[in-house]
Image: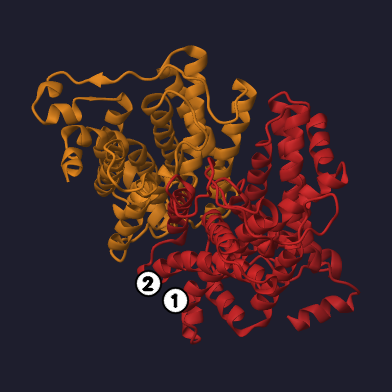
Chain colours: A red, B orange
């Protein structure tokens, strides 16, 4: 690895570091081109649609605030999916973990009366721990019963939704004393502070970025993170090297679930201040696309989350101004996912191209780069 | 206790047939796709898109059978996307399936607003009328259970022996399974691996589409947002429980169908259990049966692995 870098360095420069950013930009561009084609087929005014989309995201301070507001839970859900992928696990249960995280954070937020310094962290932590335990069930079933985590995480979403519905339904233990199916309001001491006058942006965005750095450090700089990646890369080889893949699988699903839970907790404690069934417009599902577009790299996740935050908030304005359903964004997201699915096929080609430009000759492929799993 | 004894009736078993149909279709769909070596997590999305297409077809023609044709067309198109990405572009099959599922949420919702000006539900359309099977309907016990159902429910049940026969008793089925178990060996004896996989995924799309059409123009008579409610995923669980065999999948679907019918009947009978917990029952049961099934279940050897022609 070092030799190769040196070899490339001798020729002046290496463009291999650009593989990730190029894939990122190509993913976005192809999604927008595909989306334009889609809108054109259905005889929409493409320029008006995209114009309204961007106006809705950047048109005013309030709109930018709304985009950042959506970015916050998306960073967490993207990190949750990325951490799972790095360990060889496809966590499709982030939406359910998010609902659990929001539910528990709301409960701690309204039911316990504590000083601010411990109340807010405890509410966040509670949401993370319960969602982590919920997620670890799928890890356990994968490790000890060999049941594919995609199936169990998906099915457990529906169980989580049912439990959440029960909590705030008439007669449910978290039901507020009013006509609506909502929890009581979270106390002031458990709410995230507003950061930016005139917008709803809360300190949640800073917590999210902080966690992205923590996850990056964990995956790449710690012993356990290394073991998890080893299991994700080749479970049999990792076991041969003395790593217990079962433990790592359960742990990875627990941590992934905890990050999913934080997505819900920051949403409840920073935006809604109460729990209700439909508080997430699908942030957990979007996390899959965020992680993939971000190439499973925590910093890539931040960038991808911002893009999807822009799309989410812009789409609401697009529906209001241009009359085009905000669900067009889901179609763009599906296109991003389709593109990301071909990353593995595309990456060697890109590397060969860039290696060729940088060093004047074709480079051998190395598998240690970003995007492996 | 009186409540509980009222639950078990012939109507409950009839409802079981109705509840198992939209799970049996994706289960069989998954078997065809995965037996050929292509993972198909996108069944849920294929069902949603087809369910919506069925409503559109029935809405504009006034004929529910035209709706079924629209659903099949939608299922074929969606499965072609899946096949092209997975087989030709050799993309990650789990990720493509996820994309199809997200498309399955977004596309119908977009069209719902465009065609019907609605955010969540379509107008009521004509639906398939039930078939009364002569002779059978008059039999004691069997009559009330099996005598009168949607034609799509009968087709689903008939597809079990048909799928089994096609997969295990015909040269076509042997080839289909061979490209999932050992594609290079199949290739060396002249089987076109890519073509077989395309055909298998398209069969899968048609079966999934019938499951979607059953929900929207037979069980109900309209499209509602995300109306499949995870049935595509439960179907995949049934496929695994049944060890990628149509008869085994049928047994799993009977269990899930019974659980679903029981929870619906229990809700109607005001059983003192929160309705939300009853709704969760089929999903919990799916996971529990998987715990029982695994260990003896072996997926086709080359499932989720793209084939690189040497």
Q: Nearer the viewer, residue A194 or A62?
A: A194
Q: How many marks?
A: 2
Say which element carries label 2. helix
Query: Which residue lies at the image location 52% right of the left edge and 14% below the top edge?
Result: B60
Labels 2 and 1 touching (C-beta < 8 A): yes
Quadrant containing the N terminus of chain A in the rendered view: bottom right
Image quadrant in which you'd find residue A186 = bottom right
Same chain for mark 2 and mark 1? The answer is: yes
Q: Of all residues shown, which one is farthest toward the left?
A: B140
Which one is nearer the viewer's eye here, A152 or A122?
A: A122
Q: In the picture shown, does residue B161 fall above or below A229?
A: above
Q: Residue at (69%, 32%) from the top-left corner?
A: A38
Q: Secondary structure at mark 1?
A: helix
Residue wearing tag 1: A246
Whether A308 is drawn above or below B149: the answer is below
Q: Which mark is residue A144?
A: 2
Q: CA distance from mark 2 to mark 1?
A: 7 Å
């Amino acid at each position: 690895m070092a030799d190769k870098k040196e070899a490339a360095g001798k020729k002046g420069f290496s463009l291999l570091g650009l593989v990730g950013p190029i894939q990122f930009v190509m993913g976005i561009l192809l999604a927008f081109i595909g989306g334009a084609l889609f809108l054109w087929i259905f005889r929409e005014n493409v320029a008006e649609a995209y114009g309204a989309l961007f106006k809705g995201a950047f048109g005013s301070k309030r709109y930018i605030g709304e985009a950042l507001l959506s970015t916050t839970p998306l960073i967490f859900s993207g990190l949750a999916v990325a951490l799972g992928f790095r360990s060889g696990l496809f966590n499709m249960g982030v939406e359910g973990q998010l609902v659990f995280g929001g539910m528990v954070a709301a409960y701690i937020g309204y039911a316990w009366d504590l000083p601010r310094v411990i109340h807010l962290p405890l509410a966040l932590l509670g949401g993370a721990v319960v969602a982590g335990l919920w997620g670890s069930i799928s890890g356990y079933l994968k490790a000890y019963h060999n049941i594919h985590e995609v199936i169990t995480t998906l099915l457990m979403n529906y169980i989580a939704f049912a439990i959440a519905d029960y909590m705030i339904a008439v007669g449910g233990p978290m039901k507020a004393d009013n006509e609506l199916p909502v929890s009581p309001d979270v106390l002031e001491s458990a709410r995230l502070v507003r950061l930016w006058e005139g917008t709803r942006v809360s300190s949640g965005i800073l917590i999210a970025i902080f966690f992205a750095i923590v996850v990056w450090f964990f995956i790449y700089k710690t012993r356990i993170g290394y073991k998890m990646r080893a299991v994700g890369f080749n479970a049999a080889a990792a076991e041969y090297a003395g790593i217990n893949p079962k433990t790592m699988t359960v742990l990875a699903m627990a941590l992934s679930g905890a990050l999913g839970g934080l997505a819900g907790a920051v949403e409840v404690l920073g935006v809604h201040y109460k729990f209700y069934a439909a508080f997430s417009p699908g942030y957990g599902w979007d996390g899959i696309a965020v992680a993939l577009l971000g190439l499973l790299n925590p910093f890539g996740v931040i960038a991808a989350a911002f893009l999807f935050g822009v799309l989410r908030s812009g789409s609401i304005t697009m529906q209001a101004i241009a009359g085009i359903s905000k669900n067009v964004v889901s179609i763009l997201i599906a296109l991003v996912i389709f593109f990301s699915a071909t990353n593995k096929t595309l990456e060697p080609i890109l590397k060969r191209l860039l290696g060729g430009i940088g060093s004047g000759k074709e480079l051998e492929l190395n598998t240690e780069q970003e995007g492996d799993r | 206790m009186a409540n509980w004894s009222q639950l078990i009736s012939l109507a409950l078993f009839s409802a079981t047939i109705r509840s198992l149909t939209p799970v049996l279709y994706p289960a069989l769909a998954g078997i065809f796709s995965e037996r050929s070596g292509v993972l198909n997590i996108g069944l849920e999305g294929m069902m949603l898109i087809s369910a919506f297409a069925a409503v559109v077809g029935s809405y504009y023609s006034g004929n529910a059978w035209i709706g079924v044709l629209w659903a099949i067309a939608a299922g074929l198109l969606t499965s072609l996307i899946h096949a092209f990405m997975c087989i030709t572009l050799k993309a990650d099959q789990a990720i493509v399936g996820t994309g199809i599922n997200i498309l399955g949420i977004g596309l119908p919702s977009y069209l719902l607003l465009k065609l019907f000006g609605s955010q969540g539900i379509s107008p009521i359309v004509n639906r398939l009328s039930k078939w009364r099977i002569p002779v059978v309907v008059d039999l004691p016990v069997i009559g009330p259970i099996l005598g009168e159902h949607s034609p799509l429910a009968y087709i689903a049940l008939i597809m079990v022996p048909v799928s089994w026969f096609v997969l295990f008793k015909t040269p076509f089925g042997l080839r289909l399974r061979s490209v999932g178990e050992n594609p290079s060996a199949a290739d060396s004896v002249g089987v076109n691996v890519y073509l077989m996989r395309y055909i298998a995924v398209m069969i899968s799309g048609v079966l999934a589409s019938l499951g979607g059409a059953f929900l929207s123009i037979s069980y109900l008579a309209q499209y509602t947002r995300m109306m499949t409610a995870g049935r595509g995923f439960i179907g995949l669980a049934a496929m695994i429980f049944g060890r990628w065999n149509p008869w085994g999948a049928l047994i799993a679907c009977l269990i899930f169908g019974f659980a679903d019918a029981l929870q619906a009947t229990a809700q109607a009978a005001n059983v003192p259990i929160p309705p939300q917990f009853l709704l969760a029952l089929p999903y919990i049961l799916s996971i529990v049966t998987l715990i029982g099934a695994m260990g003896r279940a072996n997926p086709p050897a080359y499932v989720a692995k793209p084939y690189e022609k040497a």
